[in-house]
Image: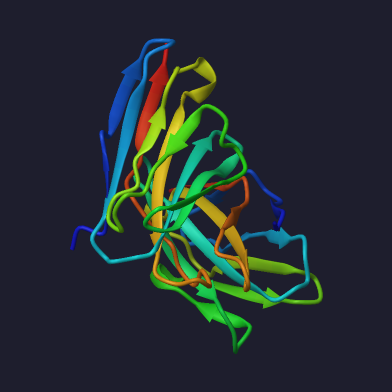
Amino acid sequence: AQSVTQLDSQVPVFEEAPVELRCNYSSSVSVYLFWYVQYPNQGLQLLLKYLSGSTLVKGINGFEAEFNKSQTSFHLRKPSVHISDTAEYFCAVSDRDDYKLSFGAGTTVTVRA
Amino acid sequence: NAGVTQTPKFRILKIGQSMTLQCAQDMNHNYMYWYRQDPGMGLKLIYYSVGAGITDKGEVPNGYNVSRSTTEDFPLRLELAAPSQTSVYFCASSPELRLTEAFFGQGTRLTVV
């Protein structure tokens, strides 16, 4: 099973500033990569996913992520955040021959005015 | 557009009591999962199922049991509740062997006192 490391547990950011959330995973075998968002008191919602093809993936709400195979990373970015982006963000990885997701510990993003 | 439905949303149990967390999906997905979410730990897989009648342990199965008599339902049973089982529980489902996306329920917040 994959090990997933989210390098920042808390990220405070001002409104309209850019944000980057870092994610590294353990194995360089073929993987599927995901970012999920959890708003307060809600379930997990898929932000974006990398299955194959272009290493730059665009998701909902203006987020994008870049897959870097050599660095086994899948960092999430947004050029300008809103107050409504305050949430917890989870990176998740699945080996292509597996049907289980491994999750990182999560990064809490707090957007301030 | 129900998706994955979990009941109850909240529950308080006394030590030693038992309960069943219900999970139902209406997307005809073969693969279903139970995760628990603890602060700073991300989501850990408890049990999963690849189809009706087939279940298997995840990372943290101790203290839990599951069954899968139908494609739609995947209940999680706690037989002797312990304080260590205080957590938020998420059920998820996926349509494919290769996990290209998982759909999550809203979660059940369980407190054992």
Above/below status of B113 relative to A82: above
Question: Residue B72: where, in percent of width, then height?
Answer: 27, 56
- Seen in the image, is A50 located left or right of residue A87? right
Q: How many marks?
A: 0
Quadrant in which the N terminus of chain A is drawn: bottom right
Q: What residue occupies the far right of the structure in this picture?
A: A70
Depth check: give the residue in front, B86 or A49: B86
Query: How far across and down, in percent of the image, does residue A14 sit?
Result: 51, 52
B17 relative to A91 in the view: left or right: left
Q: Quadrant of residue B43?
A: top right
Whether residue A85 is situated above or below residue B34 in the rendered picture: below
Residue drawn at the location 43% of the way across and 11% of the way down: B16
Colour scheme employed for the rendering of this structure: rainbow
Among all residues in the image, which is located at the extreme front?
Answer: B53
Q: Pinpoint residue A9: horizontal percent, then vertical percent.
A: 64, 43
Residue shown at 80%/71% (left/top)? A71
Residue at left offset 49%, top offset 66%: A80
Figure check: A82 above or below B75 = below
Q: In the current view of this chain or complex, which residue is farthest to the left? A: B1
A95 vs B25, left or right, is right
Q: Is residue B90 above or below residue A29?
A: above
Measured as percent of width and height from the top left, residue B111 is found at: 40, 20
* Along the line of sight, the residue nearer the viewer: B35 or A11: B35
Query: Looking at the image, which is closer to me, B89 or A77?
Result: B89
Residue displayed at 38% across by 64% down: B30
